[in-house]
Amino acid sequence: MKPKVAFFDFAGCEGDQLQVANLEERLLDLLEIVEIVNFREVISQKSDDYDIAFVEGSIATDHDAERLEEIRGNADILVALGSCAAIGGINSIRNSQDPEKVEERVYGEDADKVEAWDKAKAADAIVDVDHYIYGCPIDKDEFIHVVESLVQGKEPNIPTYPVCVECKMNENVCVFARNGGDKSISSAKREVQVPGSQEVEQGPFCLGPVTRAGCDAKCINEGTTCWGCRGLVDNPNQNAHKKVLDKYGLTVEEVLNKYNLYFGWQQEERKDE
Amino acid sequence: MSNEKIDVDVEYLTRVEGHGNIKVNASDGQIEKCEWQVIETPRYFESMVVDHSWKELHHITSRICGICSIGHTVASLKATEAAMGIEISKQDELLRKLILHAENMQSHILHVGYLALPDLMGEGSVIPLASSHPEELKTVIRLHRLSNEMSEMVGGRTTHPQRLIPGGFSKIPTEKELTELKNKLRNSFNDLMAVADLCEAKADKFPDFNRETEFISLTNEDEYAFYDGQVRSTDTGIQPVTDYKDITNEFVVNQSTAKFARNNRQSYMVGALARLNNNYDQLSPMAKGVAERFNLKPVNHNPFMNNIAQLVEVVHNVRDSINIIDKLLENGLEPQEEYHEPEIEVKAGRGIGAAEVPRGILFHDYTYNEEGICTAGNCVIPTNQNHANIQQDMEELAPNLINEGKDEDEIELNLEMLVRAYDPCISCSAHHLDVEFVD
């Protein structure tokens, strides 16, 4: 019997399920080892009988939470698919904003009708999550690796080291060593003391030292910087890329205070620990 | 005429992006309730962009939608560039046009091939096609893969592209890559015609439903507009993009967590059919040839023909992409350094950016302070602009179906097909309320 697989989505862009559709011919190969019984974006059939559930998106309403609990009850294995489900993701930017202002900015005078929570949460804030596939969007190869591992009853191998490790293997010029093209001040810019001098350097900022690897440093390869989409590396104080941080005179906390697109929910959880 | 009770209750409509319900109740042939309900959890992007840097906004708003992340990125960059008076090079503009074609192809092929064709073939999804129609499915997959390869080559990634940044590109494709892409595009016409044949063979399955409405899209003197232009309405003519709020007039309805929109009538339609209705003459001859096979001419008022308009556009996208690559290669690509970061003078100001994305016209509107930090944002999404038109269509189609004596299952299938024809992207459209419905 092939294991039955189901996909569900909460608040998010559905870009991770799109990566599954983007497997093209490889999706047909995957169907040799699993049976897809729920995939609302692509198929009409629906079923409550499934072994592995992939959930995408953040949880932000009571209705979301009830649905997620139901899915957890039906599934033997629950996998958080993509950053929104795995770590709260981009939706958690608003977690640090004043909830009243958030509603007013979007809904104006209808703000009082809004029934969403003040914070967007990761799936594991509501239910137990067995496995995590990080990324915004997820990496297609990593998705296949996780599915194959689960079908074989093995533990998927997800990196626990920072993006810098992969970036160095790709021989990229370190983002911190690049010259920014402009003199603007913004949260995406760093302003750091060059060790041993009074000089303050302006340049692009990168979250590679504190972010979980597994993306092959994709964004840096493509000429931009790491935005942190795969979330914090486990225990950043120990596992961050110390060499890069030391070289540019940064600490983990400085990096995290400086720049935050994806870490909103994770940062709150760290404070609670 | 039916005198029984009709109760159509579709929760979480499948094969669309995002969450929507269809509710229709009727007894003795009289409609008691007929609603297109949008039930997406609100996501608050217009607030999330506030306090963030001009360098991050396109990255944040790309996440409004996975399927149209490239279109959101482009509209976002155009808004930022308009706010700060940033100009991009002709080469970068051509590359942006190329990647918009790639996304339009990807999204339309996904919709026509994976989501709509199963209805025409009488299957519940694309998966059974693997055994019932393997060659046809492989054709669709080849086209889908080609458009994704194109997005990746230009933008660095198929979804949530990386290379597109304010002022240009952090990295550009090589001439060799562009030449290879051009060859692949030229070799794709057979596959495109095979999909057209497939649709033509099932053309009688498209319901013959016409309801006069208004069509709104970008228009541009020089080309079939995707990247740039003015706003054109079949009712009210041409207006500048900066008038977008007077055109879209978003409003709140109780049945929806997404805003609805209206201009000259109770509703209007955006997307492939709207573009085709407004800009038909600028389609490539081969695309027009496909339109003629389906007797699709402007102004066509059958929303089900949006599927065919998408197919026509894919042919145009392929043809125009080849033209763009020829232009890029004509004088050789202007090289740029690795990790390119365009020089930008940060300024305070407000900018509005519009682009045609797969589901229709998209507006981003940002205000920045002197430091380039966003103080206000607004995004008007294509699917929002279509919700009211879906509702109006449903109010006319549902009684028609009942009068024709269709049973509950047929009514449900037809209403589902209607919504799917719009290819709604519901999760993008919901930056609105989470309300309890009154039954």
Image: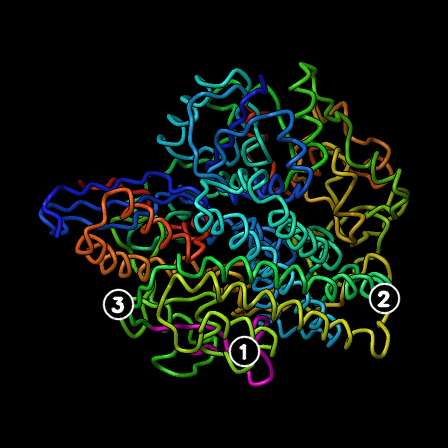
In the rendered image of this protein, does residue B46 appear above or below residue B131? Answer: below
Question: Which residue is under mark 3?
Answer: B266
Q: Is A18 on the left-hand or right-hand side of B29?
A: right
Q: Can residue B70 be seen in this view?
A: yes
Q: Are marks 3 and 2 in contact (CB under 8 Å)?
A: no
User: How many other residues sit within 10 Å of disc 3, few (<14), some (14-19) or many (≥20)?
Assistant: few
User: How many other residues sit within 10 Å of disc 1, few (<14), some (14-19) or many (≥20)?
Assistant: many
Question: Which residue is under mark 2?
Answer: B175
Whole-percent x, y for residue A95 in the image: 49, 38
Q: Mark 2 lies on which chain?
A: B
In the rendered image of this protein, does residue B78 appear above or below residue B149? Answer: below
Residue B229's tag is 1
Q: What residue type is labelled 2?
A: Glu
User: Does dot 1 land on a helix, a strand or a loop?
Assistant: loop
Q: Is B387 on the left-hand or right-hand side of B123?
A: left
Camera-side residue: B215 or B435? B215
User: Does dot 3 land on a helix, a strand or a loop?
Assistant: loop
User: How many other residues sit within 10 Å of disc 2, few (<14), some (14-19) or many (≥20)?
Assistant: some
